[in-house]
Structures are given as structure tokens and as C-alpha cells.
Amino acid sequence: MTALHADHARAVLRLLLVLTNGQRQTAEDLLQETMLRTWRHLDSVPAEPDAARRWLCTVARRLVIDGVRLRRGRPAEVHLVDMTWIPAGDDTTGSALASHAIRHALSRLSPAQRSLLSEVYLVGRSPAEVAGRLGVPIGTVKSRTHYALRALRTGLQAA
């Protein structure tokens, strides 16, 4: 098996890269699956090097075909939560840590403060609209928003 992998893995990977339109990770996953299936059926692999390479390429090609058929037969995936408002440009460790810190700071706020900040900043309602929904004066909404933001800022500084 080691000799088969050493002799043919590069050629099979090149084929898989072509068949997956250059998606390297997918091609590497399919190469691994090809080698696993080869190991399971080692007695079926031809002894001649050229025939063995053709056999491996056939297994790899069939795996790609099976993957395409599986995706076609599966219904389209839908997302239950609209996450389009979250910026996706920065996918770094720093943004993950910042996101964790914000979640932690938000969890330390009272439910009323979280709800108020959500209404004003996430939903985008004006203080007048929030005041009408809560049945309180607009000045109360503004001061509660101020104190909720201050508590959030304190929570972020502590993190």
C-alpha cells in the first residue's frame, strides 16, 4: 500500500484537481478516500504499475461522480437565521476573539438592556419607535440606551 501511494498519489491528485475544478481540499479528501478504498480492496488492485494507476484513477473518478450525484439529489440548503448583516470580510482570529468578547459582554447585560440594544442597533428602530413599543417616554429610551451601552463598554473592557 505504501508503494502504491508513493508511486501513484501525485497522478491521482492531479486528476482529482482537474475533476474538482482546482478545489485542492476536495481533491485531497477524495485522494484520501481513494487510498482508503484501495486499502480495503488491495487484492483487486492489478500488479502492473500502469494497470494499477488506471484502477486508482477509475476509483477516484467514480468517487467524484458519486459526490456530484449526491449533491444533485439533496434538496437545497436553507438557512433558518438571516446572517447577511454580519460582515464576512474579516475571517481572522482577531475577529473571532472580538466576537467572543462581545457575546460575553452581552450575556452579562440584563435582558431588558440586551433587548433595548437589539431593538435600536440590530433591528434599526428609532428611539421614538422603541418608546412607542415599550410605552415609555423617548427620553427614558435614550437614557436606558446610554446606560446599556456604558455597561456593554465596561464588560468589553473587563474581557
Image: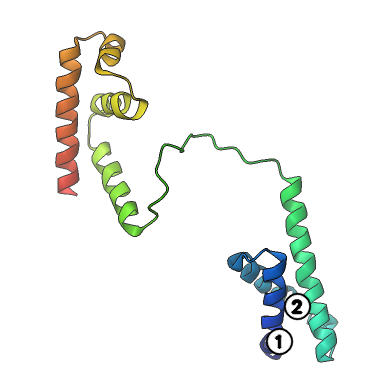
- Residue drawn at x 30%, y 42% is 103
Q: Are marks 2 and 1 in contact (CB under 8 Å)?
A: yes
Image x and y of residue 19, in percent: 72, 66
- Residue drawn at x 27%, y 28% is 117
Q: How is the image coloured?
A: rainbow
For mark 1, what is the residue?
1
Image x and y of residue 92, in percent: 36, 58
Residue 153 visible in the shown view: yes
Q: Count neighbours of disc 1 (C-alpha within 10 A) and say few if under 14, some if 14 to 19, many if 20 or more.
A: few
- Residue drawn at x 30%, y 29% is 121
For mark 2, what is the residue?
38
Q: Which labelled disc corresponds to residue 53?
A: none
Q: Count neighbours of disc 2 (C-alpha within 10 A) and say few if under 14, some if 14 to 19, many if 20 or more.
A: some
Which amino acid type is shown beneath numbered disc 1?
Met
On screen, residue 148 above or below 132: below
Q: Secondary structure at mark 1?
A: loop
Which amino acid type is shown beneath numbered disc 2?
Thr
* Residue 150: quadrant of the picture: top left
On screen, residue 13 above or below 7: above
* Residue 122: quadrant of the picture: top left
Observer-nearest of 96 and 14:
14
Image x and y of residue 101, in percent: 26, 47
Horizontal arrangement in the rendering, residue 152 relative to residue 38 (left or right): left
